[in-house]
């Protein structure tokens, strides 16, 4: 009888931006290793995930019971996408209550497999407690970071050296990550900027981050060749491996299945882009659910129009309005803007959601004005597209710093959701990146070099294995050695 396949348990935090990279990794492991995957989440997320699993995949979906009302959350709120910002931290705290059910789930798998534990548990950066469960049950455990090495290193380091508000100057350096140059307080996400050690975010992170030492290592959706600073930080700081196995991205078909309905038809978009000259379009989008203020939106519109560049802009109602409500161009954009860009054929406003990878893949796309969430960054780098960075939350500020200072493929255009912006400044930066300036040319050259690094890292053919392929092999080897060793000891 054939040996049953190895089983991997995966458990992302309940947010689309976490579930999607986990799904991409699950499909990648299934395809390249042939292992079976058990994907764990709360009931409503599992229900939604059913339609995201491609028909040829055998990923098994398993629920852990969760009732949001028990945690002071609105009924049926199991995903950050439907929660206002202040409640996200409540969902994070609530997620720690999943520990006993998760432990039972792993014990059940062990029993079902006749005493053989899963090969490993791969869990979210917010689920440090799963490492403690894995240690108790003697199962190999890794944290999977959908964030890049540099960004996560800064995030980790900043959280563990709070409070920052006591720092005398607005600039500071990270004591345990001196390889990163100095930071300015405006580069801190709101949760960290307002943290004083006793607030909910601090309480959560002081419980979560130290638990990472119980893990056997961290898997990063990144590439060793360009993200070594951050990877080395974790190797030294935690004394654990950091495996760079990326970029692992969903295919266009799987993205369509897992994503939202685009606000534009694929045929129309292709026709529009095909009609534009090579390297002439600016793509503007702020990730899956960010939005900017009305005044920032006005200024951005004026900068786009003033630059004279072609552009595609994914628009959503500004801050303070229901993000799912109708977009009112007449109220939120300069008078006559929509008509003018339509008549001139220069700009496309896409409501709420665009097929991002298709846009970034098109030869007419020149640059990406992005909030620099890590998925967007990887998608842009994978196509060699330089960026204009406008970080809004989380480790995005650190990503912009990294892309600008370390890789030279980004120019920061604006910082934060509430800052005042001037259209003249934005226009100048758009021109700097998109025109045939020395800077623009250099950025395109560097972005193309990074694209080459990515291609090489993921190559697995004719006996050649790229760094990311080797790292994933190394990860599973480490898991197998530990599991077999533990069985041997037993
Ligand atoms: N995305 C998309 N169309 C949009 C906006 C976003 O396809 O109009 C996708 C994008 O390609 C990426 C993800 O949503 O895969 C956003 O992830 P990211 O890490 O960049 O940002 P987050 O949404 O987590 O802030």
Image (spheres, rainbow, N blue to C red):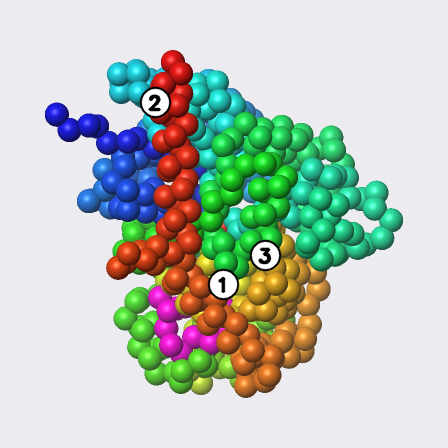
Cα distance between the residues tagged 2 and 1 = 43 Å
Image: 195 above or below 182: above
Quadrant where the N terminus lies? top left
Looking at the rendered structure, which numbered label has been put on residue 399?
Answer: 3
Residue 162 at x, y percent in the picture:
74, 39
Mark 1, other Cα within 10 Å: few <14 / some 14–19 / many ≥20:
many
The structure residue drawn at horizontal position 72% and vertical position 51%, both measured from the top left corner, is: 178
Image: 362 above or below 4: below
Residue 359 lies within the magenta run: yes
Looking at the rendered structure, which numbered label has been put on residue 94?
Answer: none
Secondary structure, mark 1, is: strand
Residue 221 at x, y percent in the picture:
46, 49
Residue 370 visible:
yes
Quadrant where the C terminus lies? top left
Instruction: Give the farthest residue toward the left.
Output: 1
Looking at the rendered structure, which numbered label has been put on residue 285?
Answer: 1
The structure residue drawn at horizontal position 50% and vertical position 27%, both measured from the top left corner, is: 131
Image: 82 above or below 255: above
Q: Is residue 253 left or right of residue 41?
A: left
Which quadrant of the view contains residue 64?
Answer: top left
Please identify, in this view, whether the residue under mark 2 or under mark 3 is nearer the observer: 2
């Amino acid at each position: 009888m054939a040996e049953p396949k190895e089983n991997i348990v995966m458990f992302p935090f309940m947010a689309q931006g976490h579930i999607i990279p986990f799904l991409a990794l699950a499909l990648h492991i299934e395809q390249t290793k042939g292992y079976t995957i058990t994907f764990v989440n709360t009931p409503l997320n599992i229900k939604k995930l059913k339609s995201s699993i491609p028909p040829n995949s055998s990923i098994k979906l398993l629920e852990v019971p969760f009732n949001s009302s028990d945690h002071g959350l609105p009924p049926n709120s199991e995903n950050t996408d439907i929660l206002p910002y202040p409640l996200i931290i409540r969902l994070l705290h609530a997620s720690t209550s999943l520990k006993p059910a998760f432990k039972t789930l792993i014990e059940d798998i062990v029993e079902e497999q006749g005493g053989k534990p899963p090969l490993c548990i791969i869990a979210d950066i917010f689920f440090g407690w799963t490492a403690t469960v894995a240690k108790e049950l003697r199962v190999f455990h890794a944290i999977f970071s959908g964030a890049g090495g540099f960004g996560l290193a800064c995030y980790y380091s900043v959280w563990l050296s709070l409070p920052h508000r006591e720092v005398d100057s607005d600039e500071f350096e990270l004591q345990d990550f001196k390889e990163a140059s100095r930071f300015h307080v405006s580069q801190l996400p709101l949760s960290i900027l307002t943290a004083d050690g006793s607030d909910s975010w601090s309480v959560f992170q002081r419980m979560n981050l130290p638990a990472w030492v119980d893990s056997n290592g961290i898997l990063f959706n990144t590439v060793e060749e360009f993200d070594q600073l951050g990877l080395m930080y974790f190797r030294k700081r935690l004394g654990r491996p950091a495996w760079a196995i990326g970029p692992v991205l969903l295919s266009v078909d799987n993205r369509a299945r897992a994503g939202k309905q685009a606000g534009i038809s694929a045929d129309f978009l292709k026709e529009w882009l095909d009609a534009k000259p090579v390297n002439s379009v600016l793509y503007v989008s702020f990730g899956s659910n960010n939005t900017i203020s009305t005044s920032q939106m006005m200024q951005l519109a004026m900068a786009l129009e003033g630059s004279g560049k072609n552009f595609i802009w994914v628009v959503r109602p500004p801050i303070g309005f229901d993000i799912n409500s109708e977009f009112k161009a007449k109220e939120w954009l300069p008078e006559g803007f929509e008509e003018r860009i339509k008549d001139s054929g220069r700009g496309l406003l896409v409501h709420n959601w665009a097929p991002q990878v298709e846009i970034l893949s098109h030869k007419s796309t020149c640059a990406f004005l992005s909030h620099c969430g890590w998925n967007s960054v990887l998608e842009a780098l994978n196509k060699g597209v330089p960026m204009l960075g406008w970080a809004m939350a989380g480790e995005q500020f650190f990503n912009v710093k990294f892309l600008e200072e370390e890789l030279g493929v980004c120019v920061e255009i604006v910082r934060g959701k509430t800052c005042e912006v001037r259209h003249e400044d934005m226009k100048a930066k758009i021109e700097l990146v998109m025109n045939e300036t020395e800077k623009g040319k250099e950025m395109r050259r560097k972005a193309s070099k990074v694209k080459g690094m990515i291609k090489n890292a993921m190559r697995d053919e004719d006996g050649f294995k790229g760094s990311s392929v080797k790292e994933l092999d190394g990860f599973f080897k480490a898991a197998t050695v530990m599991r077999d060793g533990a069985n041997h000891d037993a």
